[in-house]
Amino acid sequence: ETGVTQTPRHLVMGMTNKKSLKCEQHLGHNAMYWYKQSAKKPLELMFVYSLEERVENNSVPSRFSPECPNSSHLFLHLHTLQPEDSALYLCASSKEMNTEAFFGQGTRLTVV
Amino acid sequence: AQSVSQHNHHVILSEAASLELGCNYSYGGTVNLFWYVQYPGQHLQLLLKYFSGDPLVKGIKGFEAEFIKSKFSFNLRKPSVQWSDTAEYFCAVIFYNQGGKLIFGQGTELSVKP
């Protein structure tokens, strides 16, 4: 149990589908993150929220759309994805921006 | 952009061997340093961290790391590995001048033979 819960754990979607990934943290943290983990590549930071405001968007394609309705929840809305978007998507949270992050178990996404 | 580099992609050791995994980061002023581990099928877990003070930090499961500022390095060590240490290890750095983002190296896969 990490304190950061992601759902679903696995997701298969077609290129025309719309789906959402959910992340919830029970640690009272103020910052939340989305990372993409692909094989043989470093973890890629996608989005950062601090106190529910987006502070970073690392040139992520618009087919990925984050939402942070409150400090405990983070969503990643997906639409018209490509097969190369297949990866493990990790959510993390930290007490503040410069402190260690705690990770969820990830959502394994397959785009067909 | 600041970056983090891990020297080895895959390391294979026998049980009881000593381990050292290299990590270097690009110059970027003040940094916080981390090592994470990902066991097969599990989430990323924090092994140890360095913010300030003694550059030799001890973490969980007998791991330690040494921050050498002049070399921009933060190498991970363990005197005697066990089969259960088989996992992927990630070095990560927060560069203060990049707004506190946690940047990861590409990871090192460690396989320990029983």
Image (cartoon, coloured by chain):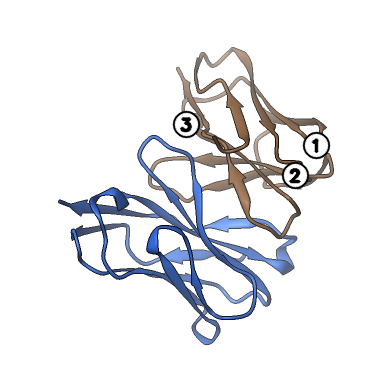
**Vertical placement of residue A104 versus B64, above or below:** above
- Of helix, strand and loop, which one carries label 2? loop
Compare marks 2 and 3 and give the one earlier in the sequence: 2
The amino acid beneath tag 1 is: Ser
Chain to which the residue tagged by mark 1 belongs: A
Q: Residue at label 1?
A: A71
Residue at the disc numbered 2 = A29
Residue located beneath label 3 in the image: A84
- Quadrant into which the C terminus of chain A falls: top left
- Check chain identity for marks 1 and 3: say if they share one: yes
The amino acid type found where label 2 is placed reads His
Chain letter for the brown colouring in the rendering: A
Q: Chain of mark 3?
A: A
Q: Position of residue B9 (x, y in %)?
A: 32, 57
**Colour applied to chain B:** blue
Q: Calculate the distance from the C-alpha at mark 2 to the C-alpha at mark 1.
A: 7 Å
Q: Position of residue B22 (x, y in %)?
A: 39, 70
In three-dimensional space, the C-alpha distance between marks 1 and 3, rounded to whole angstroms, equals: 30 Å
Name which quarter of the figure residue B80 lies in.
bottom left
> Would residue A23 be visible to someone looking at this image?
yes
